[in-house]
């Protein structure tokens, strides 16, 4: 069992509330109001900017060159792929880069991003990884499940989003993260420390649920 498997099992209620949230279900069905998705997408763009900083913090916190390279892969995935995906989808609805980048951060966005950054600043690489894991791995699980359920069909306005996170590139990034956090745990995790790592993981899951709910609340 990997560390992620253990965390997911021990945080099963929080993980299910996040990955099976009504926002995700409606996105998969194609029934999510566009106002909800647009608000989520803009906030997720702002979130990813801070998430890239968290990965950059991972470079500083890394005890080895291999860890530094893995952190750098996360930075590059956000700056070179995910942000462009968001701009592409927002552009399709007439929103400009300037409009997106100057949008104010919603409270759940600030709460989540500052939590991740604080976890990394106050702790070591494993603490940071535990705070990052729900987002990185959860999106891969959600994307794969929705694709397997046939939700990435042409008439679904959110097919592009599903295809991105179900795609080979993102799935490999997620698998790499699972192996990375497991390797870190093999070096520094003790049973005495595990409850703190689990607490960080659970909190991040709850903040992910709040992030979806923020989008769902944006009806107009």
Image (cartoon, rainbow, N blue to C red):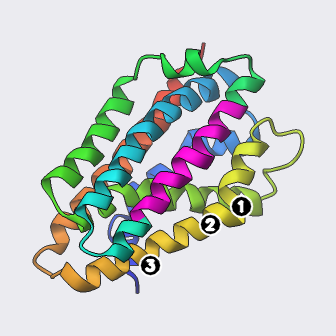
Q: Nearer the viewer, residue 35 or 17?
A: 35
Residue under label 3: 179
The region drawn magenta spans 71-88
| Residue 14: mark | none
Callout 2–callout 1 Cβ contact below 8 Å: yes
Give the x, y percent position of residue 85.
Answer: 67, 40
| Residue 167: mark | 1
Q: Is residue 32 left or right of residue 132?
A: right
| Residue 171: mark | 2
Q: Residue at x 66, y 64 (%)?
A: 169
In the image, residue 83 lies in the stretch drawn in magenta: yes
Identify whether 106 is placed above or below 189. above
Give the x, y percent position of residue 144.
Answer: 67, 62
Q: Quadrant of residue 175?
A: bottom right
How far is disc 1 from disc 3 in space, using C-alphas? 19 Å
Note whether residue 152 is visible.
yes
Q: Residue at x 74, y 53 (%)?
A: 163
Q: Residue at x 25, y 57 (%)?
A: 200
Q: Determine crowd level at label 2: few under 14, some 14-19, many 20+ residues with C-alpha closer than 10 A.
A: many
């Amino acid at each position: 069992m990997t560390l992620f498997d253990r965390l997911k099992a021990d945080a099963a209620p929080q993980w299910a509330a996040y990955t099976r949230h009504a926002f995700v279900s409606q996105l998969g069905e194609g029934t999510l109001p566009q106002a909800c998705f647009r608000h989520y997408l803009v906030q997720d763009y702002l979130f990813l900017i801070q998430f890239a900083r968290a990965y950059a913090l991972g470079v500083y916190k890394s005890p080895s060159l291999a860890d530094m390279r893995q952190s750098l892969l996360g930075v590059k995935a956000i700056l070179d792929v995910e942000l462009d995906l968001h701009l592409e989808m927002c552009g399709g609805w007439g929103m400009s880069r300037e409009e997106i980048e100057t949008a104010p951060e919603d409270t759940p966005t600030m709460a989540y991003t500052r939590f991740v950054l604080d976890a990394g600043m106050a702790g070591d690489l494993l603490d940071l990884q535990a705070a990052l894991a729900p987002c990185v791995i959860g999106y891969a699980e959600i994307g794969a499940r929705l694709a397997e359920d046939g939700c990435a069909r042409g008439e679904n306005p959110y097919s592009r989003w599903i295809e991105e996170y179900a795609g080979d590139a993102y799935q490999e990034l997620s698998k790499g993260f699972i192996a990375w956090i497991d390797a870190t745990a093999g070096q520094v995790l003790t049973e005495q420390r595990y409850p703190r790592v689990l607490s960080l993981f659970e909190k991040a899951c709850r903040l992910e649920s709040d992030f979806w709910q923020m989008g769902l609340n944006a009806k107009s």
